[in-house]
Image: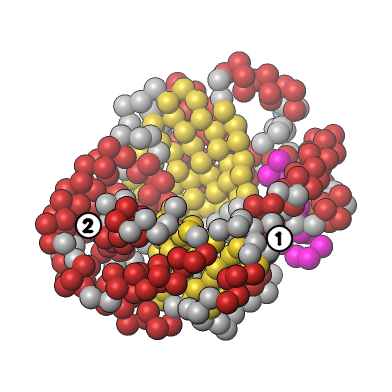
């Protein structure tokens, strides 16, 4: 595993493995739809559809035939924050894969016929997704929970009207914006990697760029603004929800690079399968159908999601308060070392998966701005103490009174709940 910063914005992560497969991903950390102007809503999603469709010398059909013949897998993706490009194949084709990906990223060729075809596909995708009840309920709930300008209310799909107006000039403008505002993370995993060649090519592309002062480089760990509305309990009654209750529990919690390892241990001890809260609510008391929990770095909360019968919501909140209200009564010392060893074994197995180690470092950069390797984190995790876990617990216990509870259902009964 190797990491280097090239220039002020290109982060190169290489993981040379004894594998026949090689996979490469390049992402612009500020290339997603969140950064679109009103007149461009949805156009970055359309850009993603077109950016790996041809090169300067190969039109759409030629590139398609070339990729099939050489067994190269090409893909692109868009999220709210990122635009990503991917290519994978046999390690003997490393140079072909890298050259293709870097051309897509830094010197893309856009084509009117491709634009028109993909525009129709994206417009259909927008219509289809917006007709999906699960999609609609997700944003209906978020609208009730978060302030209008929050990232949680942002739709990558954008505007059908703006997408329909997209021109090739828009693509040139948007890709320039992606380059100038973004840190670029290039992760390469597998066999056949020539690190010196990668570094030379990146420096060549970097030196060819012309910078415009009106665009500012955003932090690599940029966080889109998010804010809860003012409430302690929020019932969301919707005709497209289920008859039962979907419960979202948000508990404020300080989440940072320093307690990253302790949070992972807390997760296993209390929130995951065989953890105290999971076992209590699901297997011991049978109060929930399902339970899922995660610590959200951007929102600085522990989010617990549960599905249950409406009449059980109040008791579930009470039982959760009990689990998070007394560390000594709910902490199981024997489980601490058991979970530590179990997680270390699971992590060792994860390392066998191509790309997992480089993806970990990439995620660390995007989340914390710190290039922590998988091995460095494993070492920190091995040093986590019971006191470290207790500190996370105390953080949640102190903030329990500031929790927010959201219940979603088709039934108006949830408006009568006393939370």
The reply to whether residue 260 is in sight is yes
Out of 56 and 133, give the one closest to the viewer.
133
- Label annotation for residue 290: none
Label count reads 2
Mark 2 nearby-residue class (10 Å; few <14, some 14–19, many ≥20): many
Q: Where is residue 348 in the image (x, y as percent from the top left)?
A: 24, 40
Image quarter hosting the N terminus = top left
- Compared across the picture, whether 61 is left or right of 116 comes to left
Identify whether 73 is placed above or below 256.
above
Q: Residue at x 52, y 64 (%)?
A: 310
Label 2 to label 1, Cα distance in Å? 45 Å
Which residue is tagged 2?
381
Q: Where is residue 381 in the image (x, y as percent from the top left)?
A: 22, 57
| Residue 315 figure quarter | bottom left
Label 2 residue SS: helix
Which range is magenta?
A: 34-49
Q: Which residue is drawn at 50% across and 79% down?
A: 418
Q: Residue at x 13, y 54 (%)?
A: 337
Front tag of 2 and 1: 1
Sequence order check: which comes first, mark 2 or mark 1?
A: 1
Q: Where is residue 198 in the image (x, y as percent from the top left)?
A: 46, 39
Identify whether 57 is placed above or below 11.
above
Q: Which residue is drawn at 55% across and 68% down?
A: 407
Colour scheme shown: secondary structure
- Compared across the picture, whether 382 is left or right of 323 comes to left
Q: Main secondary structure of the magenta part?
A: helix
Magenta stretch containing residue 147, yes or no?
no
Mark 1 nearby-residue class (10 Å; few <14, some 14–19, many ≥20): few
- Label annotation for residue 239: 1
Magenta stretch containing residue 40, yes or no?
yes
């Amino acid at each position: 595993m190797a990491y280097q910063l090239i220039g002020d914005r290109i982060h190169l992560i290489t993981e040379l493995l004894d594998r026949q497969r090689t996979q490469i991903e390049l992402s612009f950390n500020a290339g997603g739809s969140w950064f679109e102007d009103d007149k461009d809503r949805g156009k970055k999603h359309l850009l993603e559809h077109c950016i790996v469709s041809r090169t300067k010398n190969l039109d759409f059909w030629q590139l398609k035939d070339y990729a099939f013949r050489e067994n190269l897998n090409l893909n692109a993706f868009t999220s709210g924050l990122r635009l990503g490009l991917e290519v994978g194949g046999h390690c003997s084709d490393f140079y072909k894969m890298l050259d293709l990906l870097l051309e897509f990223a830094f010197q893309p060729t856009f084509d009117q016929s491709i634009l028109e075809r993909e525009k129709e596909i994206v417009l259909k995708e927008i219509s289809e997704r917006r007709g999906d009840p699960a999609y609609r309920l997700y944003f209906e709930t978020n609208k009730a929970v978060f302030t209008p300008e929050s990232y949680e209310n942002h739709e990558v799909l954008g505007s059908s009207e703006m997408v329909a107006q997209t021109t090739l000039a828009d693509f040139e403008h948007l890709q320039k914006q992606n380059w100038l505002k973004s840190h670029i993370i290039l992760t390469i995993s597998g066999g056949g990697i020539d690190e010196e060649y990668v570094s030379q090519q990146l420096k060549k592309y970097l030196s060819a760029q012309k910078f415009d002062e009106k665009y500012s480089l955003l932090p690599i760990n940029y966080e889109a603004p998010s804010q809860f509305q003012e409430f302690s309990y929020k019932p969301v009654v919707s005709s497209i929800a289920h008859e039962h209750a979907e419960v979202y529990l948000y508990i404020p919690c300080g989440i940072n690079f320093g307690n990253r390892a302790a949070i992972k241990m807390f997760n296993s001890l209390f929130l995951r399968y065989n953890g105290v809260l999971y076992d209590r609510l699901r297997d011991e008391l049978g109060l929930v159908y399902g339970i899922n929990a995660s610590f959200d770095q951007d929102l600085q909360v522990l989010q617990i999601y549960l599905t249950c019968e409406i009449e059980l919501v109040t008791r579930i909140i009470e039982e959760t308060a009990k689990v998070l209200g007394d560390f000594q009564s709910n902490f199981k010392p024997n489980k601490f070392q058991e979970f530590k060893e179990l997680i270390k074994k699971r992590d060792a197995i994860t390392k066998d998966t191509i790309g997992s180690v480089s993806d970990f470092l990439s995620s660390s950069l995007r989340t914390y701005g710190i290039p922590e390797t998988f091995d460095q984190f494993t070492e920190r995790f091995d040093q986590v103490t019971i006191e470290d876990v207790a500190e996370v617990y105390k953080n949640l216990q102190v903030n329990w009174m500031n929790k927010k509870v959201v219940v979603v259902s088709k039934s108006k009964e949830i408006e009568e709940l006393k939370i």
